[in-house]
Image (cartoon, rainbow, N blue to C red):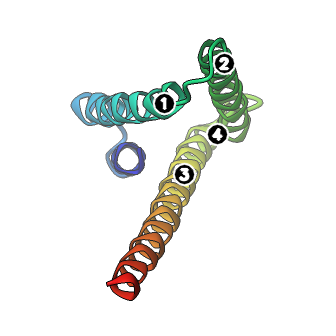
Amino acid sequence: MSAGFCILTLSARWSAAYGQSSMPLMVLGLAVMGFAELFIDPVAMSQITRIEIPGVTGVLTGIYMLLSGAIANYLAGVIADQTSQASFDAAGAVNYSIDAYIKVFSQITWGALACVGVVLVIWLYHSLKVRTRRLAVE
């Protein structure tokens, strides 16, 4: 996801520098985000379906879909609010809009990279903890 937003940030910077953006660059950014989404949902669904309590799996799957959709729609509203303009009469408004997109997409990129870092630290900590337990048992 971070790579997709990074590509969109580059596309916005390209637009600020040259007055127009590259359509393949925007499509590539959205395609990378869609491709990343294909890896996220199946992992979450497989973890939910591992729970073998009768009747709970369907409810938990529904709750996951409801919450992930609600959070995604809320964040989409926040992003739309941060990049919206009151009026587009002046040429300065277009430049302000481009700067707003660059700022928002950059923030999302760094936030996603921070989440990746946190997940990696947790994974490394867990791996080292399991490895030291195995060594202590042997």
At a point 71% along the width and 24% down the height, the residue shown is 70
Q: Residues within 10 Å of mark 1 (few under 14, many from 20)?
A: few
Instruction: Specify which label sits upstream in the sequence, 4 or 1.
Output: 1
Q: Position of residue 67 (x, y in %)?
A: 70, 27
Image quadrant where residue 65 sits: top right
Mark 3 surroundings: few (<14), some (14-19) or many (≥20) residues within 10 A: some
Which numbered dot is residue 56?
2
User: Can you identify the residue that label 4 sits on?
Assistant: 93
Q: How crowded is mark 4: few (under 14 residues within 10 Å), some or many (20 or more)?
A: some
Q: Select label 4 or label 2 by which is in front.
A: 2
Q: Which of marks 3 and 4 is in front?
A: 3
Mark nearer the N terminus (2 vs 1): 1
Kind of residue sitting beneath label 3: Ile
Amino acid found under the numbered disc labelled 4: Ala
Separation (CA) of disc 3 from disc 4: 22 Å
Residue 123, how many percent across, how many down?
44, 66
Give the amino acid type for the residue marked by disc 2 in the picture. Val
Distance from disc 2 to disc 1, alpha carbons, whole Å, reads: 11 Å
Looking at the image, do the residues carrying marks 4 and 1 touch, with CB atoms under 8 Å apart? Answer: no
Quarter of the C terminus within the rendering? bottom left
Mark 4 vs 2, N-terminal side: 2
The residue positioned farthest toward the bottom in the image shown: 136
Distance of label 3 from label 1 (alpha carbons):
32 Å
Tell me residue 132's x, y (percent): 40, 84
Nearest to the observer: residue 26 or residue 124? 124
The quadrant the N terminus occupies is top left
N-terminal-most mark, 3 or 1:
1
